[in-house]
Image (tube, rainbow, N blue to C red):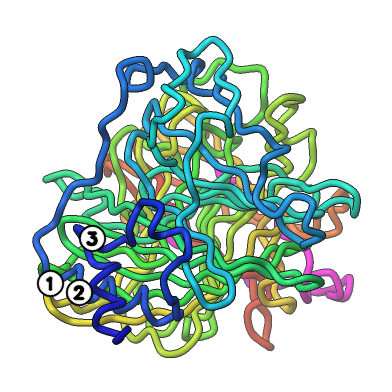
Amino acid sequence: MQRRDVLATLAIPALLATRGAAAQDGQPFAPQDVRAIARELAQKPFQAPDTRLPGPLANLSYDRYRMIRFDPQKALWKGDNLPFQMQLFHRGFLYAARVDLYEVADGRSRPIPYSPDLFDFGPVERPAPDANLGFAGFRLHAPLNRPDYFDEVAAFLGASYFRAVGRHLGYGLSARGLAIKTADPGGEEFPFFRAFWIERPRPGVNAIVVHALLDSPSAAASYRFTIRPGDDTVFDVEATVFPRADLAAAGIAPLTSMFWFAPNDRAGVDDFRPAVHDSDGLLLASGRGEQLWRPLHNPRDLQVTVLADANPRGFGLVQRRRDFDSYQDLEARYERRPSLWIEPIGDWGEGAVQLVEIPTGGEIHDNIVAFWRPKDPLRAKGEYGYVYRMHWLPLPQGNPALATFVSTRAGAAGSNGLIFVLDAVGGRLKDLPAEARPKLDVSAGPGRIQNPVAQRNPETGGWRISFELLPGNAPLAELRAVLSDEQGPLTESWIYRWTR
């Protein structure tokens, strides 16, 4: 069989290998094949995914969809003494699109066959025994928290969404393969993973490789994820994007999270909890060596913050407060939500980290998006490669010499002003002599700053910064604060967008 013939068996509409008895012996598979499929797919007109389902499955509510459970005794590789197991998601509810799944072993790709017997349907009407409905996605399990139990460590479900956890963490924010036209007035385009090839894990190796094919009206793309669970669960990602059309609004390594309220922003919220969010800030280690901390905000109107940079060292959405008292929620356990840090590898050039904040009235909606946007558009018929490492962990380390802002609080100050109170801990701040008087720089544009104060906080071992903002009639103000001494910055740069 020639390579062209192999790709032909994988090419859409026959692009995803034959679904039948003849395919059980599998097709030859090499890692570069998925990239070749994506390249070929981008040359063809877009075809929407198959979303057809029998009536009882097509109209499921969220609660009834959750009643369909995969039988864990039928997990792939269970009983094979391998470091991973895989369970599957049924189609239904929001997850109607068929996603083709393949196992790769011994250099050959074999489709993972569907059977209703893999699932417990509970009160949902069971499909016919010979139905071939396929799957919506999958999840990976590994002995993450203890050696005798396979915890769920990662899941790929819905469009190009996926999420993961580190040791002793629970699910929170999600990642996506690609973002297109996020916050665009004409509406966002949601690429989706059309197929996955999951390499059979190797005995004694704490890593599993997942290949993915992404598709959308504007682009196709290939992904290779090497997943290593641990305290810091790491995804090594190799992505190649093939635009069908010019993409001026592409988001690379997009992250999606939820922020409802916190001490800096709880106007109109009547809730017993001090804060409700999956992430409380955007962290950026810029290519210029600056570390920026941008607390999140639930605005009245959609807001887009653009942080221009070149070759960023890293960025991510972070859940910085890790104590129960900050949330007081015994069910959601927001203090256990992971942070997600993106570490670019290689030259990403000029562009910007963009933060999109969407108004929300509750905790059930993801309203925060962050991603890297290249300065120049991705051109149709081009090929664009991005390599990066994703860290799902409690907290990114950042620059150890800089104190981090662990809390941001805001409230009224008189009839026309606001007071901001920031706490910074760690870094060189903790070693300052008693007589030290660090320099406080606070700015606002537009608006006016008054009464800036920096003082030691004996309760945290750090320093507290406070200042008042007089915004006048401005609808918004961009704020910035940093502590420094003669050696340079003592803290990361705190930046914030206040909106009326």
Q: Nearer the viewer, residue 219 or 397?
A: 219
Q: Nearer the viewer, residue 429 or 70?
A: 70
Labels 3 and 1: the sequence-earlier one: 3
Q: Nearer the viewer, residue 113 or 263?
A: 113
Give the vertical position of 382 relative to 408 (above or below): below
Q: Residue furthest front?
A: 22
Horizontal and vertical percent position of residue 483: 63, 70
Task: Report the residue at 68% width, 80% height from top.
Answer: 485
In the image: residue 490, left or right of residue 293: right
Task: Report the residue at 41% width, 43% height from top.
Answer: 158
Which label was assigned to residue 43?
Answer: 1
Q: Quadrant of residue 32?
A: bottom left
Using the rendered image of the protein, determine whether residue 380 is visible from the camera's viewpoint. yes
Nearer the camera: disc 3 or disc 1: 3
Disc 1 packing (10 Å; few <14; some 14–19; many ≥20):
some
Q: Which residues are magenta?
A: 419-443
Q: Residue furthest top?
A: 123
Which label was assigned to residue 14?
Answer: 3
Residue type, numbered disc 3 = Ala
Q: Which residue is mark 2?
A: 40
Which label was assigned to residue 332?
Answer: none
SS for dot 2: helix
Residue 156 is one of the magenta-drawn residues = no
Disc 3 packing (10 Å; few <14; some 14–19; many ≥20):
few
Residue type, numbered disc 1 = Gln
